[in-house]
Structure formats: C-alpha cells, structure tokens
Amino acid sequence: QMLKLPDGTVKVLVEGLQRARISALSDNGEHFSAKAEYLDSPAIDEREQEVLVRTAISQFEGYIKLNKKIPPEVLTSLNSID
C-alpha cells in the first residue's frame, strides 16, 4: 500500500512472504532498491504461538484505547483476524 501525504512524504507498507534482513539499500534517484538475505524462521510450538498472538493483540488493543488518533474500527478489524 502506498500513501502520499500532503507534505510530499510517501509512506509504503509492504508484506513479505518470508523473513529477511536487508543487506544493502540503494537509491538511483527514481526508486529505492534493496538486497536481502533470507532468514530462517525458528520453529515454534503451536500453543506458544497462540499465546503470543493473544498477548500481542491484547497489548495492541490497550494501545488503541489510549491513542486517540487510531479509529475504533481498527479494533473491530483486529478482532476479525484469524
């Protein structure tokens, strides 16, 4: 997703298929490009993963309730994530 802000700033949100570490970043004047190294995903117990997800969601819910800039619909969207 790309968002152009009134001050000319551009914010880009990307979603990766695999974890990676950026090893080099370059700007040719027209666009940025990066070289990345794939990272191994650590094995995680399914039960532990569920606990971590619930904890992250709970923490983010608390953040949303404290931050007046985030619309309440975000909380609804968050609760619909599988």
Image: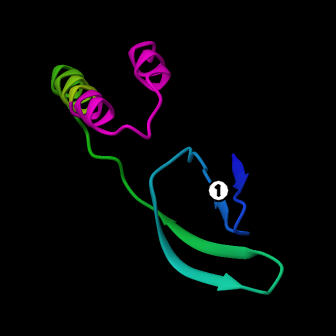
| Location of residue 52 in the rendering, given as x and y in whole percent from the top left corner | 20, 30
The crowding category of the residue bearing disc 1, from other C-alpha atoms within 10 Å (few below 14, some 14 to 19, many at least 20), is few
Q: Taking 33 as reference, is 48 above or below it? A: above
Q: Taking 14 as reference, is 82 above or below it? A: above
Residue marked by disc 1: 12
Q: Residue at x 45, y 12 (%)?
A: 80
| Location of residue 24 in the rendering, given as x and y in whole percent from the top left corner | 55, 82
Would you say 65 lies left or right of 21 here? left
Would you say 7 lies left or right of 43 here? right
Is residue 51 highlighted in magenta? no
Question: In this view of the protein, which residue sits in the foreground, 45 or 66?
Answer: 66
Q: Residue at x 69, y 68 (%)?
A: 7
Mark 1: which amino acid?
A: Val
Of the 4 image quadrants, the one containing the C terminus is top left
Q: Taking 40 as reference, is 34 above or below it? A: below
Question: In this view of the protein, which residue sits in the foreground, 28 or 34?
Answer: 28
Question: In this view of the protein, which residue sits in the foreground, 81 or 49?
Answer: 81
Magenta stretch, residue numbers:
59-82
Q: Residue at x 44, y 15 (%)?
A: 76
Its colouring scheme is rainbow
Would you say 33 lies left or right of 17 here? right
| Location of residue 19 in the rendering, given as x and y in whole percent from the top left corner | 45, 52
Q: Residue at x 61, y 50 (%)?
A: 14
Q: Taking 38 as reference, is 50 above or below it? A: above
Question: What number of labels is visible?
Answer: 1
Q: Residue furthest right?
A: 30
Please, what secondary structure does the residue beneath circle 1 have? Answer: strand
Q: What secondary structure characterizes most of the magenta part?
A: helix
Is residue 60 highlighted in magenta? yes
